[in-house]
Amino acid sequence: MEKIPLCLDDICEAAERIKPYVVRTPLLRSKPMDKFLGCKVYLKPEMLQITGAFKMRGAMNKILSLSQEERDRGIICSSSGNHGQACALAGKMTGTHVVVVLPEDAPHVKIDKAKALGADVILGPRLYKDRWKMVREIQEKNGYTMAHGYEDYTVMAGQGTIGLEILEDLPYIDTIFVPVGGGGLIAGVATAVKEINPKIRIIGVQAKASDGYVQSRKAGHRVEVECFPSLADGLGCRTPGENPYPICEKYVDDFVSVEEDDIKEAVKLVAGEAKLVAEPSSCVGIAAILGKEIEVKPDENVAFILTSGNWDIDMIGKILNNEHVDGML
């Protein structure tokens, strides 16, 4: 296999680089959840992170890795969710010009949030490939640096600091469940963990409605799948990210996908037993065990990465009240 341009040293350097700017979230033991999941449960609550999501780690590492000249010119990204907000805030904290390209039909609240954090917001096509064509044209015209949410190795290294923190707090962890969309988070976490202790099991989890990594693992190569509305809309994955994919093939033990009903039950379990509000996209690891998509043992130390930067209070309320909730693309 070809050499992958991401290694443990990159992630350790990222940890030192971003340390003054991000929250080092704790690893919480949740004994009440043990009886429901059949293992020893640990939660990594990235909802305590700035902006409420792990994306701040990658965005900050990207900006801090740039030269002063590059920062002065600015960065550009395209994200209607956590990555765009993270880039905007990281730019504000470091005095870096940030341009966020959002879909033209993005909710006004997301547009307003990015603007409030100091970013210049440009609206582009809803269709992903058309919007990214626009992003690249703007980048080339203005000399901006691209900050891709999951294809960028520097961003992956920032996300991988989560893996380092889990091992620092619990060196004898057995299994880590990671939500998977484009693959930047799991690529970073898996690199950090496996290069320290290859015996630790890394499980990537997606919604069945959008499981490009699961189907690609089955096929033995990257494939494109049809995507359907899901409560885990933050994990949209028509096809695996080009750069994260070989890392995941090297380090991730298994990919599984989960049903919508199990995602709902996972959200309720986290709220009811751990007293945390987590967005459905981050609860898929718990859903995988509830739906018996993967086995764990009673004496197994299992960590779940949670986040809530993209949660909707009305959606969460309906889930907790057992009301009907429509998924989103």
Image: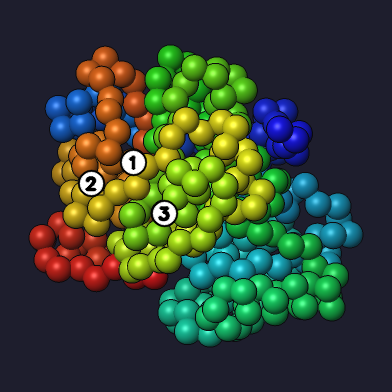
Secondary structure at numbered mark 1: helix
Residue flagged by tag 2: what amino acid is it? Ala
Task: Point out residue 81 in the picture as x, y percentages from the top left corner.
Answer: 49, 65
Task: Point out residue 293 in the picture as x, y percentages from the top left corner.
Answer: 27, 38
Disc nearest the viewer among 1 and 3: 3
Between 218 and 79, the residue placed more toward the observer is: 218
Q: At 55% across and 78% down in the image, what residue appears?
A: 127
Task: Name the residue tied to disc 1.
Answer: 285
Disc nearest the viewer among 3 and 2: 3
> Whole-Å distance between the Cαs marked 3 and 2?
18 Å
Image quarter (top left, top right, bottom left or bottom right) of the N terminus:
top right
Are dots 1 and 2 in contact, CB under 8 Å? yes
Task: Name the residue tied to disc 2.
Answer: 266
Q: At 86% across and 55% down in the image, what residue appears?
A: 68
Between 229 and 167, the residue placed more toward the observer is: 229
Residue 24 lies, with reference to residue 138, above or below; the image says above
Between 14 and 90, the residue placed more toward the observer is: 14
Task: Name the residue tied to disc 3.
Answer: 211
- The crowding category of the residue bearing disc 3, from other C-alpha atoms within 10 Å (few below 14, some 14 to 19, many at least 20), is many
Residue 63 placement, left or right of 149? right
Residue flagged by tag 3: what amino acid is it? Asp
